Amino acid sequence: MASTPPRRALEDAPTRARGDLLRAFQRKVTDLLLWTLGALGLVSLVGAIAAHVWGFSVILFSTGSMTPTIPAGSAALVRLVPAGDLAVGDVTTIERPGQLPITHRITSIQPLAGSPSTRVVTMRGDANPVDDPEPYVITDARLVVASVPGVAQFFVGLRDPRLLGLLAVLAGGLVTWAFWPRTARRATAAAAAAVVVGSTLLAAPDAQAAETEHQVVGEHLVLTVVSDDTAMSSMIPGTPVLWQVGVNTRGDEEGAVHIGLGLGATSVDAGALTADVLACTERWVGTTCPGSAEAWVVDAPLDEAFLPSTHGDTHEFASISAGEPVWVQVRATLTREDPVVSAQLKLDAWGGGEVVSAETDNGGSKGSLAYTGASGIGESLTLAGVAIGTGLVVARLAGRRRRDTGREVAR
C-alpha cells in the first residue's frame, strides 16, 4: 500500500517553493552585481595597463580655449609620445613646471640644436586669436587621440571622496553579504575587483589647464585679461595662480589712466589667500617681466591687500599716461586647505570720463579664485581598505565555519 505524505509536508510545500524562488532571485541579483563589479574591475585593469604600457590616459577640459574642436566640459583620450612624433596641427598636452598642464594645437615645431630628441613648439588654442606667449621646449607630450564632449563633470564627480567612501562601504558590504555562505575564493576575486575600481577612481586625472585671453573694450580704454580658469577654480595650497590684465588706450587719447584693484563682495574667507601684485611695462611671460617691473603688493592677505578703498570699491595703485600700457599681474596663493574659500578679483581702469572693469569671472566662465582640491582622499582610501578587508575576513570565517559544520554533520 502506497504511503501518503504527511499533511504538514503538503502544507509546507508552497512555502518552500516561494523560498526557493526568492533564493534564486537573490542569487541572480548577487551574480549581476558581482559580474558588474568584475567587469568594472576588468575595464579598470585594462585602463591601468594601457596607461603604463602604451602611455594612454584621460584629461578633462573645463575651459573653452579649444572650442569648437574640444569644448569646455569634454574628456579626451591622450597618449604620451616622443616630441619627434609630433607635427604641426596636433593637439597636445604639455607639462609646465609649477603650473597645470596646457592643451593647445601646435602651430610650429622646430628641433633644438644639439639635442636630437628635443623640440621647440609654439601652440595656440583654437578659440584664441594669437599664439601662446612663449614657446615650449619639450622631449615628449600627450597627443590627443579622441575627445567626447559633455562628460568631464561625470569624471570630476567620481573623485568626490564622499562618493569614493560610499562606494567602498557598499563594495565591502556586498562582498560580506554575497559570500557569507560560500567559499572565500570568489570573495577574494570580488574584493580585488573592488580595489582595482577604487584605485582607478582615485587616480582619475586633474582637469587640464588652458590659458585664455579676452578683452574688455571701452570707448577709450581696453583691458586684455589673461587667465587660467581651471587653475583659479582648483587651487592647490602653496602653488601660486596668476591673473594678468593689460591696461591700454585705444588710440591717440591723452591724459592719465588710473588703475585700482578690489575684492568682490561675494568673496568667502579670502584671508586664506595671500597676494602679490606687480606691474610691468610689457606683457608678463609666466612670472618674468621682460621690461621694467614694480611691486604694488607683497605677500599680503587677500582680504587686506586692497584696503582702504579709494575709488569706488577699489584701491588706486597707479596713474599712467595714455598710450603707455602697463601689465598688472596678481599672484594669489592658497595658504591652507579650506573648501569654502572663494575670492573674486576686480581691476578698474578709469580716465577720459569712463570706467572699464575686468573681473576674474567675466571672461565667459567661472574664474573666481577657489579651493576645490579633493581633500580626504587618504581617509577614503583607508575606509575602502577597511570595508573591503572586513568583508573578506568575514567571508573567510563564514566559509570556514560552514565547512567545519559540514564535517561534524557528516560524522
Image (cartoon, grey):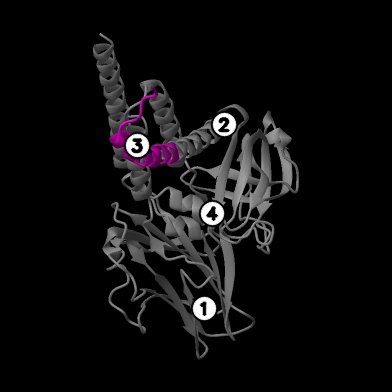
Where is the N terminus found, in terms of image quarters? top left
Label 2: which secondary element: helix
Q: Report if the CB atoms under discs 1 and 3 are less than 8 Å apart.
A: no
Indicate yes or no whether the magenta region holds residue 165: no
Q: Nearer the viewer, mark 2 or mark 4?
A: 2
Q: Earlier in the sequence, mark 3 or mark 4?
A: 3
Three-letter amino acid code at the position of disc 1: Ser
Mark 4, residue position: 152
Q: Nearer the viewer, mark 3 or mark 2?
A: 3
Q: Quadrant of residue 260?
A: bottom left
Task: Estimate the spatial distance between the alpha carbons at disc 1 and disc 3, rounded to whole Å.
Answer: 103 Å
Crowd band around label 3 with a 10 angstrom C-alpha radius: few (<14), some (14–19), many (20+): few
Task: Estimate the spatial distance between the alpha carbons at disc 4 and disc 1, rounded to whole Å.
Answer: 45 Å
Task: Estimate the spatial distance between the alpha carbons at disc 2 and disc 4, rounded to whole Å.
Answer: 21 Å
Mark 1, residue position: 321
Q: Earlier in the sequence, mark 3 or mark 2?
A: 3
Q: Residue 374 or 291: which is nearer the viewer? A: 374
223 in relation to 28, above or below:
below
Dot label at residue 46:
2
Three-letter amino acid code at the position of disc 3: Leu
Q: Magenta segment range? A: 1-25
Label 3: which secondary element: helix
Q: Residue 330 or 289: which is nearer the viewer? A: 330
Label 4: which secondary element: helix
Where is the C terminus found, in terms of image quarters? top left
